[in-house]
Image (cartoon, rainbow, N blue to C red):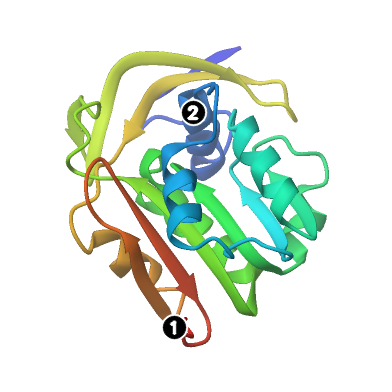
Amino acid sequence: MIKQLSHGQHNPLEGIEAELLIATTTRISRKTITAPLKTLIAKLPDAFLNKSVLHFGKGKANFDSLELINRSKSYSEIDIGTPNADQILKRQYEAIWCCYVLNVLKPSPRNVVINQLSDCCSLNGQCYVAVRSHKDKGIIGKPHLDGVLTNRTRKVTCPVTQETITGKTFQKGYELDEARKELKKHFKYVRYIHQVGAYHILAAAHTQFIES
């Protein structure tokens, strides 16, 4: 049975799970590492070097995965439908990479994900987050909550229940300092690594940053 995912209407999955499933349809296949990861590595070459790494919300960024695997001492990845997700989320990591995940989530599931990132980040670790900025001209749609609903309707099947839902994807372009304020709700320390152009990159941690 296909259920419509829309505001105020019951869905076969509870709200946040359904929103996360719809968000997975925004994945884009790439032929190289993402621009944010390339920028991060250029600015912080040791960010993932010889560390336990979690690739959170991998999507189709296979080249990001290969780059992280080559740099890390151990590597894990998680996405919707990952079979051992519970075990992965119970561990803590020295470095986390989360690229273009928060900007496709509405406020409630976004807060859940940031909390998971915080829980997975070790005491002396760092979580690196990339989000699309308000300057990204590709974010187009009807205003909804703190972002927009795109015009394209998507269909997705839950890998666990096999239920199918449809809905419009959500996109958010972050204003200056907006992502930092969100991350500060779950991390004590947050700073910008990159804050110009179509994307922002932030580092979040539970202990104070050591400047090199």
Q: Which mark is residue 211?
A: 1
Residue 211 is at least partly visible in this image: yes
Q: Work out whether 99 lies above or below 92.
A: above
x, y percent for residue 117: 57, 62
Label 1: state its secondary structure: loop
Check residue 146 in the rendering and tell me which mark sits there, or answer none: none
> How many C-alpha atoms fall within 10 Å of the one at disc 2: few (<14), some, or many (≥20)?
many
User: Which mark is in front, 2 or 1?
Assistant: 1
Amino acid marked by disc 2: Ile
Point 20% across, 25% down: residue: 140
Q: In the image, what residue type sits under mark 1?
A: Glu
Depicted 115 relative to depicted 56: above or below:
below
User: Which residue does the numbered mark 2 point to in the structure image?
Assistant: 22
Name the residue: 76% across, 48% down.
85
- In the rendered image, residue 159, in percent from the top left (x then y), is placed at 72, 26
Left or right, 181 with reference to 12: left
Q: How many discs appear?
A: 2
Q: Relative to 186, is 37 above or below?
A: above
